[in-house]
Image (cartoon, rainbow, N blue to C red):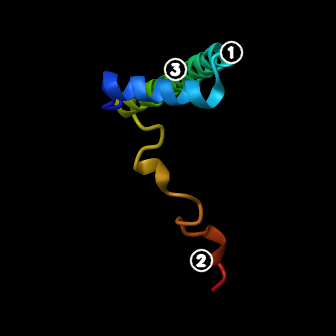
Amino acid sequence: MFGIGVQELIIIAVIALLIVGPKKLPDLAKTLGKGLRDFQKATEGITEDIKQTVQSDETPKNNASQEKPLITHDQKETKADQPDETSNNKS
Protein backbone atom coordinates (compact mmCIF):
# COMPACT_ATOMS: atom_id res chain seq x y z
CA MET A 1 0.00 0.00 0.00
CA PHE A 2 1.80 3.12 -1.28
CA GLY A 3 5.16 1.50 -0.54
CA ILE A 4 4.81 2.07 3.21
CA GLY A 5 5.99 -0.75 5.46
CA VAL A 6 4.97 -1.72 8.98
CA GLN A 7 7.74 0.34 10.59
CA GLU A 8 6.66 3.50 8.78
CA LEU A 9 3.06 2.97 9.82
CA ILE A 10 4.10 2.59 13.47
CA ILE A 11 6.13 5.81 13.31
CA ILE A 12 3.19 7.68 11.76
CA ALA A 13 0.83 6.31 14.45
CA VAL A 14 3.20 7.38 17.26
CA ILE A 15 3.55 10.89 15.80
CA ALA A 16 -0.24 11.15 15.40
CA LEU A 17 -0.69 10.01 19.00
CA LEU A 18 1.75 12.67 20.22
CA ILE A 19 0.18 15.46 18.17
CA VAL A 20 -3.53 14.68 18.63
CA GLY A 21 -3.49 12.95 21.98
CA PRO A 22 -4.95 9.66 23.15
CA LYS A 23 -8.48 10.98 23.68
CA LYS A 24 -9.05 12.40 20.22
CA LEU A 25 -7.10 9.81 18.22
CA PRO A 26 -10.03 7.32 17.90
CA ASP A 27 -12.34 10.09 16.69
CA LEU A 28 -9.72 11.20 14.18
CA ALA A 29 -9.28 7.62 12.93
CA LYS A 30 -13.06 7.17 12.61
CA THR A 31 -13.39 10.41 10.66
CA LEU A 32 -10.48 9.50 8.43
CA GLY A 33 -12.00 6.05 7.77
CA LYS A 34 -15.39 7.55 6.84
CA GLY A 35 -13.70 10.03 4.52
CA LEU A 36 -11.73 7.31 2.77
CA ARG A 37 -14.85 5.14 2.43
CA ASP A 38 -16.85 8.04 0.93
CA PHE A 39 -14.00 8.79 -1.45
CA GLN A 40 -13.87 5.15 -2.53
CA LYS A 41 -17.65 5.07 -3.15
CA ALA A 42 -17.48 8.27 -5.20
CA THR A 43 -14.58 6.90 -7.23
CA GLU A 44 -16.45 3.65 -7.92
CA GLY A 45 -19.53 5.61 -8.99
CA ILE A 46 -17.56 7.75 -11.40
CA THR A 47 -15.78 4.68 -12.78
CA GLU A 48 -19.14 2.95 -13.42
CA ASP A 49 -20.51 6.06 -15.15
CA ILE A 50 -17.48 6.25 -17.42
CA LYS A 51 -17.70 2.53 -18.28
CA GLN A 52 -21.40 2.83 -19.11
CA THR A 53 -20.77 5.91 -21.27
CA VAL A 54 -17.98 4.19 -23.17
CA GLN A 55 -20.11 1.09 -23.73
CA SER A 56 -23.10 3.12 -24.91
CA ASP A 57 -20.89 5.15 -27.25
CA GLU A 58 -19.37 2.01 -28.78
CA THR A 59 -22.67 0.18 -29.35
CA PRO A 60 -24.29 2.64 -31.83
CA LYS A 61 -21.05 2.97 -33.81
CA ASN A 62 -20.96 -0.77 -34.46
CA ASN A 63 -24.61 -0.83 -35.56
CA ALA A 64 -24.28 2.32 -37.68
CA SER A 65 -21.35 0.95 -39.66
CA GLN A 66 -23.43 -2.07 -40.70
CA GLU A 67 -26.41 -0.02 -41.92
CA LYS A 68 -26.76 1.06 -45.53
CA PRO A 69 -26.50 4.77 -46.28
CA LEU A 70 -29.83 6.52 -46.64
CA ILE A 71 -28.70 8.66 -49.58
CA THR A 72 -27.15 7.02 -52.60
CA HIS A 73 -24.75 8.65 -55.02
CA ASP A 74 -27.52 9.20 -57.58
CA GLN A 75 -29.68 11.05 -55.05
CA LYS A 76 -26.93 13.49 -54.05
CA GLU A 77 -27.57 15.75 -57.04
CA THR A 78 -29.70 18.71 -56.10
CA LYS A 79 -31.78 21.08 -58.15
CA ALA A 80 -28.93 23.58 -58.09
CA ASP A 81 -26.72 21.06 -59.91
CA GLN A 82 -29.33 20.46 -62.61
CA PRO A 83 -29.77 23.06 -65.37
CA ASP A 84 -32.87 25.22 -65.23
CA GLU A 85 -35.28 24.93 -68.13
CA THR A 86 -36.09 28.63 -67.85
CA SER A 87 -32.47 29.75 -68.29
CA ASN A 88 -32.21 27.87 -71.63
CA ASN A 89 -35.36 29.53 -73.03
CA LYS A 90 -34.08 33.14 -72.61
CA SER A 91 -32.41 33.28 -76.03
Indicate the amino acid at tag 3.
Answer: Glu
Indicate the amino acid at tag 2.
Answer: Asn
Q: Are marks 1 and 3 in contact (CB under 8 Å)?
A: no
Secondary structure, mark 2, is: helix
Residue occupying image coordinates x 63% and y 13%: 26
Instruction: Examine the rendering and report whether any part of residue 34 can be seen.
Output: yes
Pair 1/3: label in front:
1
Indicate the amino acid at tag 1.
Answer: Lys
Indicate the position of residue 53 as horizontal and vertical percent values: 51, 28
Secondary structure, mark 3, is: helix
Indicate the position of residue 73 as horizontal and vertical percent values: 40, 50
Lateral position of residue 8 relative to residue 39, left or right: left
Q: Please say if 83 is above or below 36.
A: below
Q: Which mark is residue 88?
A: 2
Indicate the quadrant where residue 72 lies.
top left
Residue closer to the observer: 10 or 28: 10
Residue closer to the observer: 19 or 44: 19
Instruction: Examine the rendering and report whether any part of residue 63 can be seen.
Output: no
| Sequence-first disc among 1 and 3 | 1
Q: Which mark is residue 23?
A: 1
Q: Please say if 80 is above or below 27.
A: below
Indicate the position of residue 81 as horizontal and vertical percent values: 53, 66
Residue occupying image coordinates x 53% and y 21%: 40
Q: Please say if 76 is above or below 25.
A: below
Q: Which residue is mark 3?
A: 44
